[in-house]
């Protein structure tokens, strides 16, 4: 009897055995790491909510996805390998070219739906907890729906930062608005007294398409960067002298237009060396940024650059501020800005919740294999059990679909309704932020029509079968 069951369900059994083998392979686990030295960091504890363990396959996939260092290449690698596996599994089946192409199309659509889930689904979040009450967690680069590509409202921005353990953060919307920070501060007064929000703006000092982005922190009115072109020194003087604020260079590695040394000489207060939206840069570039910061006593930061895409963050910046709990909100903001403006680099730490993995083009080419190895071999016991549980649930559902195909139709209808309703929510949100936002209208329509297309694709065959 046992042998028959094993033979009948050998696929799922072998998969579970493979997960246990990977789990037993000794490899580095996720832990707090110093973003500057790359060494394990004491004095901080990661708090993972019980729901995150229960939903590990969903939470873990999302976290893995947002740790990509070469987002496009690694995502494309996954899609190509999934399609290759589909073709290999169906190699012996006698199906014509059109059926094979339809199958590949379904695979691609399924992959896109998974990407939508990873990007838009709210999931449990881990938080960082310093042991010292004077170690404060900050994020100096985040956005709201008042940014042209933000999909998180000011209140969602507040809730997201509090859930990750941040004590203070800046809202740096772009191109030319402080409205997101203002709305968030009003909400904080009413509902979130623990939230310390710094008003900021992300600007582009460009001539044509060439230039650099900058974060202006601690300002109280909109800065129109078009007046300054690429004259960075004028921007830094404005931030320092007029507003008594600070200026940070975010994700310099994306453009690399200005020389690092020239930026330091122009008076910037620091650089991002990590962002959660694009973990990069390559190690050699990060080392060059570190060298410039250490030579010029500039601040190194890790930021979320959160626009509302994705649930998790694994990057924090810690700053030591004496007697933090006894300061009022204004004094807390001033203390952070003073430390930035006066370049108290020794007070700051960049903290990653990560593990050491190879990051190179060979890894990206074989991303599904390398990434899966490091992910599954670094799981904790409860997380592995969660995977086993959900694999059994998924396998049982697939078996049920073979017996009753109607359940697949119902599942697709459920997904379609979720997409459709989310599209309506985003379009409704766009009406309130159309003065600032461009992406809500586009994304809302994509989700709306994707949901409608899936509904039609499922319901029409059902109606046709019923009529027959």
Image (tube, grey):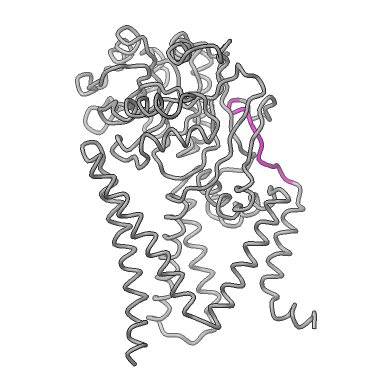
Instruction: Residue at 50%, 74% (x, y): give it.
Output: 87
Q: Nearer the viewer, residue 197 or 17?
A: 197
The prevailing secondary structure element of the residues shown in magenta is loop
Q: Quadrant of residue 349?
A: top right
**Would residue 197 be visible to someone looking at this image?**
yes
Residue 296: x %, y % from top left? 49, 12
Figure check: 50 above or below 111: above
Q: Quadrant of residue 460?
A: bottom left
Q: Nearer the viewer, residue 192 or 171?
A: 192
Residue reaching furthest to the right: 2
Instruction: Residue at 47%, 13% (x, y): give it.
Output: 328
301 relative to 38 in the view: left or right = left
Residue 405: x %, y % from top left? 49, 80
Residue reaching furthest to the front: 190
Total numbered labels = 0
**Would residue 289 be visible to someone looking at this image?**
no
What span is in magenta? Answer: 27-36
Q: Is residue 217 magenta?
A: no
Figure check: 392 above or below 207: below
323 relative to 216 in the view: left or right = right
Residue 379: x %, y % from top left? 68, 49
Instruction: Residue at 64%, 39% (x, y): give it.
Output: 356
């Amino acid at each position: 009897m046992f042998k028959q069951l094993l033979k009948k369900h050998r696929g799922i059994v072998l998969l579970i055995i493979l997960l246990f083998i990977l789990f037993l392979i000794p490899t580095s686990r996720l832990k707090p790491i110093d973003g500057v030295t790359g060494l394990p960091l004491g004095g901080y504890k990661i708090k993972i909510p019980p729901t995150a363990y229960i939903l590990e396959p969903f939470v873990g996939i999302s976290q893995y996805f947002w740790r990509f260092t070469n987002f496009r290449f690694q995502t494309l690698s996954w899609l190509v390998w999934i399609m290759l596996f589909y073709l290999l599994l169906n190699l012996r089946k006698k199906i014509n070219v059109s059926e094979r192409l339809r199958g590949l199309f379904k695979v691609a659509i399924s992959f896109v739906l998974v990407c939508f889930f990873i990007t838009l689904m709210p999931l449990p979040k881990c938080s960082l907890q310093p042991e010292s009450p004077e170690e404060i967690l900050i994020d100096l680069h985040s956005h709201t729906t008042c940014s042209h590509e933000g999909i998180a409202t000011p209140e969602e921005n507040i809730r997201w930062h509090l859930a990750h353990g941040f004590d203070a953060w800046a809202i740096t919307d772009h191109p030319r608005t402080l409205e997101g920070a203002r709305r968030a501060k009003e909400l904080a007064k009413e509902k979130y007294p623990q939230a310390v929000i710094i008003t900021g703006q992300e600007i582009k000092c460009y001539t044509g398409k060439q230039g650099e982005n900058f974060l202006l922190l601690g300002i109280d009115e909109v800065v129109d960067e078009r007046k300054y072109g690429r004259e960075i020194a004028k921007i830094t003087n404005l931030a320092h002298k007029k507003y008594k604020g600070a200026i940070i260079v975010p994700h310099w590695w994306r453009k690399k237009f200005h020389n690092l040394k020239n930026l330091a000489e122009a008076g910037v207060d620091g650089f991002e060396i990590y962002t959660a939206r694009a973990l990069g840069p390559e190690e050699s570039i990060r080392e060059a940024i570190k060298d410039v910061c250490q030579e010029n006593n500039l601040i190194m930061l890790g930021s979320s650059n959160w626009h509302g895409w994705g649930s998790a963050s694994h990057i924090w910046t810690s700053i030591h501020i004496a007697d933090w709990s006894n300061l009022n909100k204004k004094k807390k903001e001033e203390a952070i800005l003073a430390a930035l403006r006066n370049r108290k680099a020794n007070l700051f730490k960049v903290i990653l919740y990560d593990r050491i993995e190879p990051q190179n083009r060979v890894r990206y080419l074989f991303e599904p294999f390398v990434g899966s190895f490091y992910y599954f071999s670094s799981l904790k016991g409860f997380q592995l059990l969660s995977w086993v549980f959900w694999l059994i649930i998924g396998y049982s559902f697939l078996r049920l679909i073979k017996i009753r195909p109607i359940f697949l139709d119902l599942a697709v209808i459920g997904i379609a309704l979720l997409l459709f309703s989310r599209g309506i929510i985003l379009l409704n949100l766009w009406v309130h932020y159309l003065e600032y936002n461009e992406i809500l209208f586009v994304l809302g329509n994509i989700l709306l029509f994707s949901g409608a297309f899936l509904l039609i694709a499922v319901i029409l065959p059902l109606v046709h079968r019923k009529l027959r």
